[in-house]
Image (tube, rainbow, N blue to C red):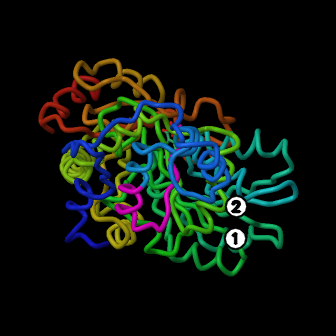
Amino acid sequence: MAKDNFSTLGVRSGTARTEFNEHSEALFLTSSFVFENAAQAAARFTGGEGGFVYSRFTNPTVSMFQERLAALEGAEACVATASGMSAILATSMALLKAGDHVVCSNAVFGATVQLYSTILSRFGVETTFVSPTRVEEWQRAARPNTRLFFLETPSNPLGEVSDIAAIAAVAKKAGAVLVVDNAVCSPALQRPLEFGADLVIHSATKYLDGQGRVMGGAVLGSKALVMDGVFGFLRTAGPSLSPFNAWVILKGMETLEIRMLAQSERALELAQWLEKHPRVARVYYPGLASHPQHALAMRQQRTGGALVSFDVKGGKDAAWKVIDSTRLISITGNLGDVKTTITHPATTTHGRITPEARAAAGIGDGLIRVAVGLEAVEDLKADLAPGLT
Ligand SMILES: Cc1ncc(COP(=O)(O)O)c(C=O)c1O
């Protein structure tokens, strides 16, 4: 990663000033754009002339968001979407057709599992779920009709780390496109394209916004995959990012790097404290030396990230006791906020998948996920301690 200029790109890239020379990026709340005459309208609609047409597929604030995120991920192209899930849907609809096969990590976000196993399956797309860490399973699962490999690293909520370069090599051999969901790390900590991924997906709702305000998503990669493929679906089908949300996230990206570093620092300290706690059976945090893929995580990522999960002894009742005893930490499903959040994955984010799929993904009843924010770590420990008795 080009660490030396990431900070500068975060605050300066993608800025396009209007004739008024505003310093802060402008918010263009307009559905459509006016043309000089009929000929210009025709040229803009057919793509013969560049310029803005209609905010379902072209808007200056959304363009600034796309350019800034592309600069941060080191991507040739970026297309913004209404949410992280619509980024995954748009990618799948653009790249897949009936009869195609997908190999997907079994440790991806619950809604991603649902999308592949219950929605896309109705359109003739078959998905095989495999371990995020055992590369040989990806190799074995690949078929002549496999078009797409999908993974999330580190996974949410268990922090399992996939070897992007190794899986990219398998994907290449299989003729499949490797898609990596980078929502948990953000480009401040990990840039999957540098390890051979073909596309990067974001839930911009998470760390890119960083303050839990708006929904957003993005798909990044080569011009050929993003502009010729995903953009076409978006333009026609319409799960587009609103200019207002783009503006909020664009400004959020200005503090992305310092937030990620500060939140990771607190997460590591909290994970170390939890690891020593007698009521905690296991801590899942890639930044801990005891994590099974710690060495790989430190090669791929700048820090362990801000997501810490742990198994509390005593199953669901004990986990709910910890959650219900908190007074400072917010009980909410989101992650990526500067306010620390706490979740019981088995009954919330992963509550809709079958118990068998949950067990296969290692989501136990005693599992708690803490998405660490910017509070003093002493206050976080003091908030968790009363429930851990
Ligand atoms: C890793 C990951 N990917 C994708 C999503 C979906 O994003 P969104 O909620 O913006 O649709 C989430 C949401 O929590 C997530 O955690």
Q: Label 2, on which residue?
A: 103
Q: Position of residue 203 (x, y in %)?
A: 47, 44
Q: Residue at x 58, y 43 (%)?
A: 37
Location of residue 142 by image quarter? bottom right
Tell me which amino acid carries mark 2: Val
Q: Residue at x 81, y 54 (%)?
A: 126
Q: Residues within 10 Å of mark 2 (few under 14, many from 20)?
A: many
Say if residue 314 shows up in the picture: no
Task: Find the magenta span and give its range.
Answer: 67-82
Evaluate if marks 2 and 1 touch, with contact meaning CB atoms under 8 Å apart.
yes
Alpha carbon of mark 2 to alpha carbon of mark 1: how far?
9 Å
Most foreground residue, 389 or 115: 115
Location of residue 95 by image quarter? bottom right
The quarter of the rendered structure image containing the N terminus is bottom left
Secondary structure of residue under mark 2: strand
* In the rendered image, the vertical position of residue 31 relative to residue 49, given as above or below: above
Tell me which amino acid carries mark 1: Ala
Q: Label 1, on which residue?
A: 176
Most foreground residue, 279 or 195: 195
- The question of residue 77 being in magenta is answered with yes
Most foreground residue, 361 or 82: 82
Location of residue 214 by image quarter? top left
* In the rendered image, the vertical position of residue 369 relative to residue 286, given as above or below: above
